[in-house]
Image: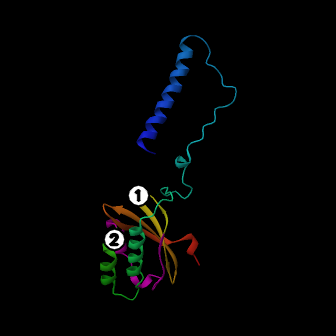
């Protein structure tokens, strides 16, 4: 929720409370609405059923797709020695995810090659979800903007790409 929306919501609540208080101070009963008050929040305020940050389709930054594709190209090499594999994926990942990747044994990576370049599925100016095809299925790569560049924050199997 944006700061402006929060302020507007508080302002509306304050006005409603003030209206209720005003009618009570005059001794007159508060007016009753003829129908129940139904408030529907704007669509962008509804909870996300997957419990992840909301994203909206937008003009996709091709650099996000390029970063996801480059990352997956380096990630999908299970035959590399672990130290080399980690050194190759680290520059494309946010620091926390890079630390998590330090625990990965590349021999357990199921993909060995890219079969389709990255395609942005959803994006905001600061976050993009990119699908990258591999020989193990379609990966969903979450990229976040870090200043002028994109970095990978998470990788998982895309719902569309599960076998």
Coloring basis for residues: rainbow
Q: Residues within 10 Å of mark 2 (few under 14, many from 20)?
A: some
Can you name the residue that lies furthest to the front here? 59
For the residues carrying marks 1 and 2, which lies nearer the camera in this image? 1
Position above or below: 46 against 88? above
- Percent across and percent down for residue 120 are 48, 68
Closer to the camera, 26 or 68?
A: 68
Q: Are marks 1 and 2 in contact (CB under 8 Å)?
A: no
- Percent across and percent down for residue 151 are 36, 67
**SS at mark 2 in the image:** helix
- Percent across and percent down for residue 96 are 34, 65
Numbered range of the magenta stretch: 94-119
The stretch drawn in magenta includes residue 95:
yes
Residue under the point 30% across and 82% down? 83
**SS at mark 1 in the image:** loop
Task: Kindly identify which residue carries mark 2.
Answer: 98
Can you name the residue that lies furthest to the right here? 34
Pointer 1 or 2: first along the chain: 2
Report whether 93 appears left or right of 136. left
Task: Kindly identify which residue carries mark 1.
Answer: 125
Q: Quadrant of the C terminus?
A: bottom right
The stretch drawn in magenta includes residue 78:
no
Residue under the point 53% across and 26% down? 16
- Percent across and percent down for residue 81 are 33, 87
Can you name the residue that lies furthest to the bottom here? 79
Residue under the point 52% across and 47% down? 45
Spatial distance from mark 1 to mark 2, Cα to Cα?
22 Å
Report whether 103 appears left or right of 5. left
């Amino acid at each position: 929720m944006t700061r402006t929306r929060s302020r507007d919501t508080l302002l509306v609540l304050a006005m409603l409370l003030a209206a209720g208080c005003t009618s009570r101070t005059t001794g007159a009963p508060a007016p009753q609405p003829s129908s129940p008050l139904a408030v529907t929040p704007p669509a962008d305020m509804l909870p996300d059923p997957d419990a992840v940050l909301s994203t909206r389709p937008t003009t996709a930054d091709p650099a996000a797709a390029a970063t996801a594709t480059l990352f997956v190209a380096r990630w999908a090499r299970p035959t590399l020695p672990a130290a080399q594999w980690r050194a190759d994926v680290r520059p494309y990942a946010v620091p926390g995810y890079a630390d998590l990747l330090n625990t990965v044994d590349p021999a357990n990576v199921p993909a060995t090659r890219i079969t389709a370049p990255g395609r942005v599925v959803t994006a905001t100016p600061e976050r993009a979800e990119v699908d990258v095809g591999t020989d193990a299925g379609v990966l969903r790569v979450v990229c976040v903007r870090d200043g002028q560049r994109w970095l990978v924050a998470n990788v998982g199997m895309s719902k569309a790409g599960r076998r």
